[in-house]
Amino acid sequence: MIRTLNAQVRYIGTDDHVSDLFESQYILPEGMAYNSYRILDEKVAILDTTDDATADAWKTNLREGLSGRTPDYLVVHHMEPDHSALIAWALAEYPGLKLVCSAMALKMLPQFFEGIALEGRTVTVGEGDILDLGTRKLRFIAAPMVHWPEVVMSFDETDGALYSADAFGKFGALDTCGFYGRDDDDWSCEARRYYFNIVGKYGPQVQTLLGKVAALPVKTIRPLHGPILEDNLGEYVGLYDTWSRYAVETEGIFIACASIHGGTLAAAGKLAEILREKGAGRVEVSDLCRSDFAENVEDAFRHSTLVLAASSYDAGLFTPMYEFLHRLQIKGFCNRRVALIENGSWAPTAGREMKRMLSEMSGITLIEPMVSIRSRMKTTDLPALETLADAILK
């Protein structure tokens, strides 16, 4: 896909509808975009490459986008292979090309490209450095751990474009979701799933970055994934601020359930019914065994209250719930109210293990009482579910 953004800047990125998983773990129901740009000025700059899956398409877009010119620079904002797979090819194809990257990226390059010859072919940039292309100047912004340590962003002072690396990105190919954010039916949904599962652990670093961005006259954000953002920038930045502060985005209750034979799921469903009858505004229930784990992580961060309902298993915790809590832990889940339902046929252990895992997360407030059922929910369990519902809504 090639799009002319203005007289000097073209989009030369690619859409991937072949890969089934992103980072070998996140489903891609609407594909994935790998964004890349070309700037034609007195000097010619390529901004990032692409993933191996779309290498041929990117080479075609690049050659067409160069309009017969020879590139002087390849700017590497992020070394992750979905953006850097064609670096060695570009160096071989254009002998006069120089890589522009951070010092950390320079150290990483031989890790990805064995035997790569870089002497005399690199320009190292850091905070505040400028790449002068002629009429356009790219000012670099260090963005370590958003979400790799070598990340830099760049700001084009001519048109107010922020090339934001993986920040403000989302899942989805542009030919499916729209080239601009205004064309995207629900940008926040897949951007949220992307943020919490890819970047989410690094909220403090994102907060630092947002402080730097606030000082710039940004008119458009051009991420490495997802559509270009131009309208309502305050909305996108506001969501990133909420997410990176681990603040509540949506007042509501997310019930995550891991049930072996359906008994625990029935109890979770009954609790949701009771909560709605008592006036709870938003109650979402997810079967962890049959749903996308990345969406479950997203929903846990999004809502104000989390309810965990799980079966006991091998004197511990049923594995889908264990995996869910492990993922929450490594992504930095914190500052939420959490209620528990456990199930066990002879020696319930799920509650004990859930409490242990939650104790390793910061700012977690357990809502009492924990409800413990045996095998199947019975009428004698209803008062405990009623009491728990009252405590959740208190």
Image (cartoon, helix red, strand yellow):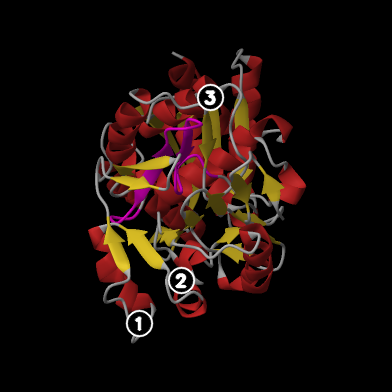
- Residue 214, x across and y down, in percent: 36, 24
Q: Which residue is mark 2?
A: 87
Q: Quadrant of residue 190?
A: top right
Q: Which residue is mark 1?
A: 116
Total label count?
A: 3
Residue 302 in the image: above or below residue 95: above
Asked which secondary structure carries label 1, the reply is loop
Q: Observer-nearest residue: 361 or 70?
A: 70
Mark 2 or mark 3, which is nearer the start of the sequence? 2
Mark 1 or mark 2, which is nearer the start of the sequence? 2
- Residue 254, x across and y down, in percent: 54, 33
Mark 1 or mark 3, which is nearer the start of the sequence? 1
- Residue 248, x across and y down, in percent: 44, 24
- Residue 276, x across and y down, in percent: 64, 20
Asked which secondary structure carries label 2, the reply is helix
Name the dominant secondary structure of the magenta segment.
loop
Hey, what amino acid is under mark 2? Ile
Q: Which residues are magenta?
A: 148-169
Q: Is residue 166 magenta?
A: yes
Q: Which residue is mark 3?
A: 233
Asked which secondary structure carries label 3, the reply is helix
Is residue 343 in view from this perspective?
Answer: no
Residue 5 in the image: above or below residue 92: above
Hey, what amino acid is under mark 1? Ile
* Classed neighbour count for the residue bearing mark 2: other residues with Cα under 10 Å, few (<14), some (14–19), many (≥20): many
Q: Residue at x 63, y 52 (%)?
A: 291
* Classed neighbour count for the residue bearing mark 1: other residues with Cα under 10 Å, few (<14), some (14–19), many (≥20): some
Q: Is residue 377 magenta?
A: no
Q: Quadrant of residue 371?
A: top left
Answer left or right for 45 relative to 21.
Answer: left
